Amino acid sequence: MTTVNDPSVPRPCSSGDRIMWLTHERIFYAGLLGAPVMHDKGAITVYVAIEGRLRVRFQGGEWQAAEVVVVQPYVPHEIASEGRHVIDLLIEPETVDASRLSPWLRACGAVHVPGFAAHVRATHQRLAAGAGTQPLQPADFDAVFFGQPLPGRMLDTRIAGVFDGLRSDPSTMDAAEQCAAQAGLSFSRFLHLFKEQAGAPFRSVRTWKRARALLQHVNSDSNLVYVALNIGYPDSTHFSHSIRRTYGLKPRDIFAGSRKLRVIAQPVMHPSLAAG
């Protein structure tokens, strides 16, 4: 017999349960999903049902129903839920060795991992409760949700330096020519090596990192034009188009849906989740 607090069963989610844990390399989001529209994120994305089941489809194909959906980076997809909320984990692909990930994390579509789904929902409940006093650090993320650190990878030091810049300050993202010069490579060699290392073209990665930077501001009172300029967009039109292509929503709709979203900064005092 199950109860309303049984994490093996998706349950209703209230506005007080909406939360996002944001680090440079990972994101955990539990909140509103919105209407089924196209998404195109530059991260390994794991959707977990929190209310009812999920549905996903790719390029107008057949809908797949599941409790957990995995989407690989830069794969356009539509995601829908029987309820208003969803859990979403994002893994920056340059930080993991994909060949050593669990097979289900290398999939693209519906996956059957009920134990993982129950664990993530239970972790969300503990995060939302906000009890405890142990600091929660970025390095804890994988242990909290996956039970152990995900297998890392070593990038070419020249490309790793470029990623450091992309992550740390999206508002001053250099053009590919400047990054090539800083890496001591010809322009063509830089583009080839970057794509080889990142699995995606430089322009696509830069677009994703900039759109990702929006998430730091979603529950702030900042003017949207200020946010756009602050994270490196040249104007509000470019900003709106890029964000909608990435998340399927206009920036103002993302901000409206995030008014009650609690964002976890680093470090923060939270329960000892990794032991759960």
Image (cartoon, rainbow, N blue to C red):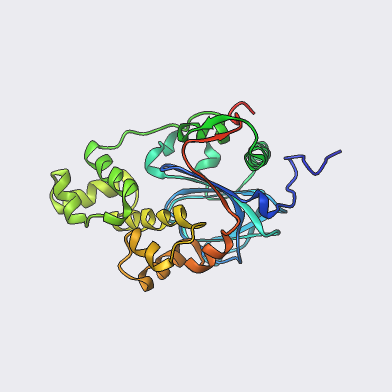
11 horizontally vs 69: left or right? right
Please state, as top left, top right, bottom left or bottom right, where the C terminus lies in the image: top right
Q: Residue furthest right?
A: 1
Q: Examine the image and state in which quarter residue 164 appears.
A: top left
Q: Examine the image and state in which quarter residue 158 appears.
A: top left
Q: Position of residue 95 (x, y in %)?
A: 39, 39
Q: Residue at x 25, y 41 (%)?
A: 161
Q: Compared with residue 74, is residue 132 higher up or lower down, i.e. above or below?
A: above
Q: Residue furthest top?
A: 275
Q: Compared with residue 163, is residue 203 higher up or lower down, i.e. above or below?
A: below
Q: Nearer the viewer, residue 165 or 64?
A: 165
Q: Nearer the viewer, residue 28 or 49?
A: 28
Q: Residue furthest front?
A: 221
Please state, as top left, top right, bottom left or bottom right, where the N terminus lies in the image: top right
251 horizontally vs 128: left or right? left
Q: Residue at x 48, y 30 (%)?
A: 149
Q: Nearer the viewer, residue 115 or 136?
A: 136
Count of picture labels: 0
40 horizontally vs 86: left or right? left
Q: Position of residue 10 (x, y in %)?
A: 73, 48
188 horizontally vs 96: left or right? left
Q: Position of residue 145 (x, y in %)?
A: 57, 36
Q: Nearer the viewer, residue 73 or 15?
A: 15
Q: Position of residue 162 (x, y in %)?
A: 26, 45
Q: Residue at x 62, y 51 (%)?
A: 18
